[in-house]
Image (cartoon, rainbow, N blue to C red):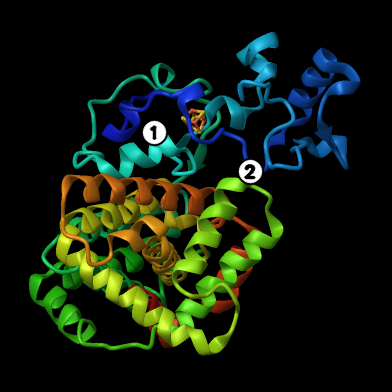
Amino acid sequence: MPALAPPRYMSRFRCIAERCEDSCCAGLTVPVSPPQARRIRDALGDTAPLSEEDPSLGAVLRMRPDGGCALLDAERLCSLQRHHGEALLPDICATFPRVVTRWGERWELAGTLACPEVARLCLLAEDAFHLEAAVPPASLLPRPDVARAIEPGEAWTAHAETVRDALLRWLDRRTHPLASRIALLGHFAHAVEDVYFQGTRASREALQAHLDAALQHFDRADTQQAVHQDFAPLALPGAPSVGLFASILRARMAALRGPRFRALAHGVLTSLGLDTDDPERLEAAWRLHDARWRHLTGTHGARLDQVFRHYALHAVWRTPFTDAPTLLGYVFRLALRLGLLRFVLMGHPRVEALHLAPATPEASASLDLAVVETFQLVARHVETSPEFLTLARGLEGTGRGAQTLGKTLVFASF
Ligand code: SF4
């Protein structure tokens, strides 16, 4: 089996088990394949907490009313693993929080930020994205076969690694603020959208020539400077985005019983004065958000920059853009998620307490706690939720054209 090069945040990862502030499965859907469901039924009989509408399609594990898995014991450890061993676990439980992608013959490892320990390692360590020496996949992965595969057979995927390398390179280039780098990604995606999309019929050669020219153009320092100069002075209204993000939190609070997420969402809405959905309050909430962001940029700017940059790098590394129908749609969603995370972080009660406070080691430690809680709970309870995905799809439209680019810039500038 070919070697796998893990980023440092994943080579460092060790599950912290009973010291973890969450559990792997809380609030998530756990699919179980038909053979795995049969084995669990054989072991647990009628007590197997499986819901299966159509056994040929597999099942999902039933969750308790508080959102935790029915198989967690009193110590919040998995009773299935404890009594029957790792082999009986569904794939997602055996591999969580690891996410593996096979690009042709090459394997890549990422982690999900839904795990608090992965979120800490990925967002807070400066060298989180340093690539380690390659190792055999089996030494890092319990089930190496459970990997998403990207086959470079068609034009869309054949050029994907080159395009993704450019996205990662531009996101990591710190000459301009991250918001301007997201704008750059948006402009690049818009520039190639006529020929480069899922299902494109352009020949590989024609596509190669088109992409090479666009990559060369957007790689140039003067192009990046021009995008930044056009984008940075834009003063886009923030109140509509505040209303949108607040409505997402409210929808998730109504759908979820997870106490950690509900406490965070309630704290965010209260601290920004959005505890009722009175539209009159949006402008004031936006001004508060903006004031906190400006203050924090002055006191903890380097930390904020690292955290959001690592989030963006992680997103592009973990979820290949080839999953989306268009590159611009993918960049739009990244900008939308970044905007949502900024909103939740600026509303976090710890950040409220840091507003106007000086930069001290205690303040930095408190900001780090707020960051991990925000990014982890949003990854677990919002980013893949039906409410958020439906909203993102609606806003994204066709995932092409000046309108989608415009919306990308709105959320990038939030
Ligand atoms: S969420 Fe992460 S750290 Fe927590 S128990 Fe699961 S794997 Fe371990």
Q: Which residue is mark 1?
A: 107
Residue 180 is drawn in which quadrant? bottom left
> Residue 28, labelled with which disc?
2
Q: Looking at the picture, tell me which residue is in the foreground, 303 or 392.
A: 303
Residue at 23 percent across and 64 percent down: it is 296
Q: Residue furthest right?
A: 46
Q: Looking at the picture, tell me which residue is in the foreground, 378 or 193.
A: 378
Q: Amino acid at mark 1?
A: Trp
Residue at 46 percent across and 56 percent down: it is 322
Disc 2 and disc 1: Cα gap in Å? 26 Å
Mark in the foreground, 2 or 1: 2
Residue at 30 percent across and 57 percent down: it is 308
Residue 317 in sight here = no
Residue at 42 percent across and 65 percent down: it is 347
Q: Amino acid at mark 2?
A: Leu
Give the structural element (helix, strand or loop) at label 1.
Answer: strand
Residue 359 is drawn in which quadrant? bottom left
How many numbered marks, from 0 up? 2
> Residue 95, labelled with which disc?
none
